Amino acid sequence: MTCNNQRRANPRGAKRRMSGQSTVEFIIAAPVILFLILSTIQLVLLYRAKATLDFATLEAARAGAVNGAKMSEIKQELAMGLTPLFATEASIGGITKARIKAELEVENPIYTNVDIISPTRAMVNEHRERQYNGRFALPNDNLAFRSARVGRTGVNVQDANILKIKVTYHYPLIVPFVGLVIKGASKYIKPSGPFDKVTLRPEPLGRHDRLAIESYAIVRMQSPIYTGTLR
């Protein structure tokens, strides 16, 4: 009876025990919650980058379609489409800086790779014709009335006029700790998860690892492709 009365009369000890238990639970749960928040931020940034890259790739393919699949025109339009990823100021100066940064990223093969999957050089050479200026090119006029004969390359002149490009952009993982977990460099999480085969590329200055994001676009050519244009 006396013991029960002492417990009732001393509630401070119970409060201390509850407070200590809450502190331990918070210490255990806080890192997990923080990591989930950081992961969500990084995934949102990756989604934004993928959506921007898809739009930029489509615009780049359109530029190639009307400019004879010239790589310079494709990269120029790609840089224009990627500019929003680097814009941090709502001003002319900020947009100009973002455009310059996008052009540097696109021209750097460490960060960006642009490949013309179709047509190939063999397709252009197989179906080429002499143009009005005397140069040979893959013809783009009157395709509906041309022969649909399939050549050695396995396509006819109509299918050879379909431009397909692939853009691989290595996006920086700027959120702290998340990039380490994705590449398996964390001491606390072993590299045995779904990100084992993810392509990561380190920055030259070692600031952030970069995750490879791919995008494809297919459009119909609107201009002839001259021989020697494709690599």
Image (tube, rainbow, N blue to C red):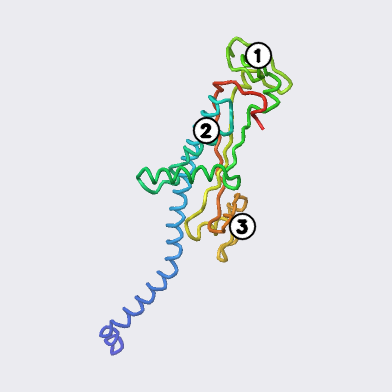
Q: Locate residue 135, reporting x and y percent.
A: 66, 19
Disc 2, disc 3: CB below 8 Å? no
Residue 48 position (above or below residue 125): below
Q: Earlier in the sequence, mark 2 or mark 3?
A: 2
Q: Locate residue 176, reporting x and y percent.
A: 48, 60
Whole-angstrom CA distance, mark 1 to mark 2, is: 28 Å
Q: Earlier in the sequence, mark 1 or mark 2?
A: 2
Q: Which of pointers 2 and 3 indicates the residue nearer the eye?
A: 2
Residue extending farthest bottom: 2
Is 22 displayed left or right of 223 in the figure? left
Q: Which of pointers 1 and 3 indicates the residue nearer the eye?
A: 1
Near mark 2 (Cα within 10 A), the count class, few <14, some 14-19 or many ≥20, is many
Pick the quarter of the image with the N terminus.
bottom left
- Which quadrant of the structure image shows residue 165? top right
Q: Which mark is residue 192?
A: 3
Disc 1 marks which residue?
148
* Amino acid on which disc 3 is placed: Ser
- Which quadrant of the structure image shows residue 162? top right
Is 1 displayed left or right of 179 in the figure? left
Q: Which of pointers 1 and 2 indicates the residue nearer the eye?
A: 2
Find numbered disc 2 in the image and state the secondary structure of the residue it sits on: helix
Disc 2 marks which residue?
60
Whole-angstrom CA distance, mark 2 to mark 3, is: 37 Å
Residue extending farthest front: 133
Q: Earlier in the sequence, mark 1 or mark 3?
A: 1
Q: Residue at x 64, y 20 (%)?
A: 138
Whole-angstrom CA distance, mark 1 to mark 3, is: 51 Å
* Amino acid on which disc 1 is placed: Ala
